Amino acid sequence: MNYFVIQCYGKERILREAKFCVLSLLRYLQGQEGYKIVLYTDNPAFFEDIKEFVVCEPLPPETVQQWKGEHNFVHRVKIQMLLDFASKYSGKFIYLDSDTWFKQSPAELFTQIDDSNALMHLPEAQLKSNANPIIKKIHRFVKANTFTLTNGEKVNIPAEYFMWNAGVIGLHTNARPVMEKVLQLTDAMLAAYQKHVMEQLAFSYFLQKEFTTRRCDDVIEHYWPYCAVAEQPMIELFTGIEGQTMADKIAAVAGFDWSFTAEKPVKKSFWQRLFNRQ
């Protein structure tokens, strides 16, 4: 069995994005066997209209809080979720952030996942490139630090490694030991520097170290810079297709107008970001 795993809890915007992702995927999966879509969610009722196509794994607030760990790190939840998934299911899986959608059939992607090959969305920058302020800070951080895992293994992250976008991750569940190390490295780095990209950096390191990492941005779009501007058009889309047939819903998602992504997103101020988190 091949799996898609989507993290979708909390704000209605995130749930809506996840439903959009599922509908974009169903365009290619309907009538196909050997695939299962697993949603980790605190609100299965939101997905009532697509329940025949998904499996909902419970993700209540108390579990989310526990999985955030000692440093209350939101992206740590993803790693714990994938470890939980690997303890319950067996096979190849593609993890998806909610703010993703499918441009092409994913069938070919699963042929690229094996004991030697993994998927991430795309390489963003080589650490030593100092391509942007975040990469520059991370380069300086990894150059100055050695990290210790719970088994005593020492980790030095080479400056030649790339920071990959972790909005998509493709592995086999038998890579659970690697995911355990991702969790341990994330915690070790957070103890030294609480930066929002630590889970992404940990996945980037271990998937490059243990696998040949392949990109999949030709098949899957990750529109994370545009979530805010996509919200109202998606609300209007789902309002318009409420009560329609599944075929009509899938067609509406396939025809969604993404032209607004041609414009560079406006960077929010600190106060705007703070308000949006409330």
Image: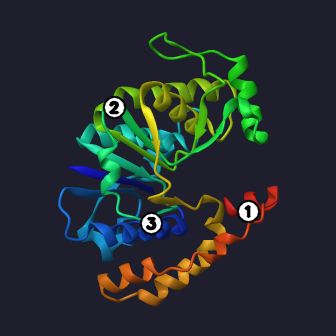
Q: Marks 2 and 3, how far apart in space?
A: 27 Å
Q: Which residue is mark 2?
A: 175
Q: Marks 1 and 2, how far apart in space?
A: 39 Å
Q: Is residue 137 left or right of residue 95?
A: right
Name which residue type carries label 2: Ala
- Up-down relation of residue 149 to residue 70 (above or below): above
Q: Nearer the viewer, mark 1 or mark 3?
A: 3
- Position of residue 113 measured from the top left corner of the image (x, y, whole percent): 33, 41
- Position of residue 14 measured from the top left corner of the image (x, y, whole percent): 52, 64
Q: Nearer the viewer, mark 1 or mark 2?
A: 2
> Residue 201, can we see it?
yes
Q: Which residue is mark 1?
A: 275
Q: Is residue 166 left or right of residue 30?
A: right
Describe the element under mark 3 as helix, strand or loop.
Answer: loop
- Earlier along the polypeptide chain: callout 1 or callout 3? 3
Q: Name which residue lies at 23% across and 41% down.
A: 90
Q: Quadrant of residue 102?
A: bottom left
Q: Quadrant of residue 156?
A: top right
Q: Which mark is residue 103?
A: 3
Q: Name which residue lies at 48% across and 86% down.
A: 239
